[in-house]
Image (cartoon, grey):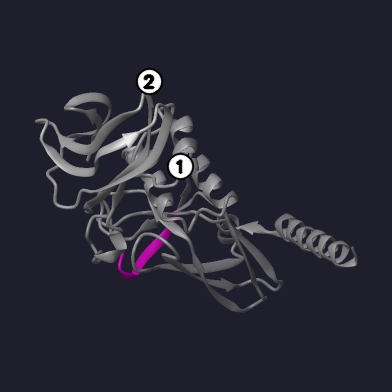
Amino acid sequence: MMKTTAWIAALAFTFSVYQQLNAQAIPLGEALKKGYLSFTATGNGGHTGESLKLKLVNKSKKQLTVLVAAGQVFEAGDSSLQNLMVAKEEMFMVEAGRTRTANLSGLCIEASDGSPGEGSGFSLGKMAEGNLLKMARYLSDNNLHTNPAAQFAVWAVSDAERLESIGDPALAKFTADMLGKPVPEYHIEYQQPQDRMLPGQPANWREAMALNGLFYYDLSHDTKVDFGLYNEQGELVHTLFKNRLQRRGSHKFRFNFEIRGLEKGKYFVRLTRDGQVLKELAAEF
């Protein structure tokens, strides 16, 4: 009981300190306008994770708590490189007359532009607006800034990329609801861009690796069924199981097909019996 009480007290104290810091914090843009602060922003290489490095110089005679809000955009000095949006709100204390260096979690908001290299210069841009700002705040509030699906969710807003790229079901639903689109029924897993990214290479240059999701179906009686992936011409590409006895009733299972190297286009995930399609799910990659 005493341990629980002490833990609650510590948590309350931490929250109180955070609230006080937040109340005293000055947004980065405001600190710059008032001349309290100077800064430089450079890339750490890449367009996800801690992709930005800030150097904050306190020019005032008092300690500053600098707020960098989720949704703050940093513009690349080279217009061929991607702008980055802060995906996790941060506060940095900088002593009077001192310099502080810190990293920021940033995500790309221009998928077709080149990936920033280490040392690429950035300037402070505007705050994101509309759905992009909502996305940034959602990622920050839910600590999803390090989730690999976060970048694909941002691209779904900034570049109208497909929701099927978002590998986190809850994040995919949030994005779909926000954009007024259907919740995706399957997920396309891509080779992570950072696995082969080079400075200047477009972020959306990636390869589909796997098709996965949940498949639901009902059977009126016990029967043997096949399950596989078919191309648009009706040719069987991959088999997950064949001639499996399934009992009558409602069923669901998770499927996963390797699709690396397959031609882009329309495909069908099918449950069949003696060549007859019982249920199918259309997919495209």
Instruction: Residue at the far top: name it.
Output: 220
Nearest the eye: 257 or 109: 257
Q: Main secondary structure of the magenta part?
A: strand
Q: Residue at x 22, y 38 (%)?
A: 228
x and y percentages locating residue 152 in the rendered image: 37, 47
Q: Which residue is mark 2?
A: 220
Residue 90 on image: x %, y %: 59, 60
Q: Secondary structure at mark 2?
A: loop
Q: Is residue 226 above or below residue 149?
A: above
* Residue 51 magenta: no
Q: Amino acid at mark 1?
A: Pro
Q: Which residues are magenta?
A: 116-124
Q: Where does label 1 land, which residue?
A: 169
SS for dot 1: helix
The amino acid sitting under disc 2 is Ser
The quarter of the picture where the N terminus appears is bottom right
* On screen, residue 30 above or below 39: above
Dividing the picture into quarters, in which one does residue 214 lie? top left
Query: Which residue: 37% across, 24% down?
Result: 219
Residue at the location (30% across, 68% down)?
A: 117
Q: Distance from label 2 to label 1 (Cα)? A: 30 Å
Q: Residue lying at the far right in this picture: please name it.
A: 2
> With respect to residue 216, does 33 lie above or below?
below
Is residue 146 found left or right of 227 in the rendered image?
right
Few, some or many residues within 10 Å of mark 1 (<14, 14–19, 20+): some
Disc number lying in front (2 or 1): 2
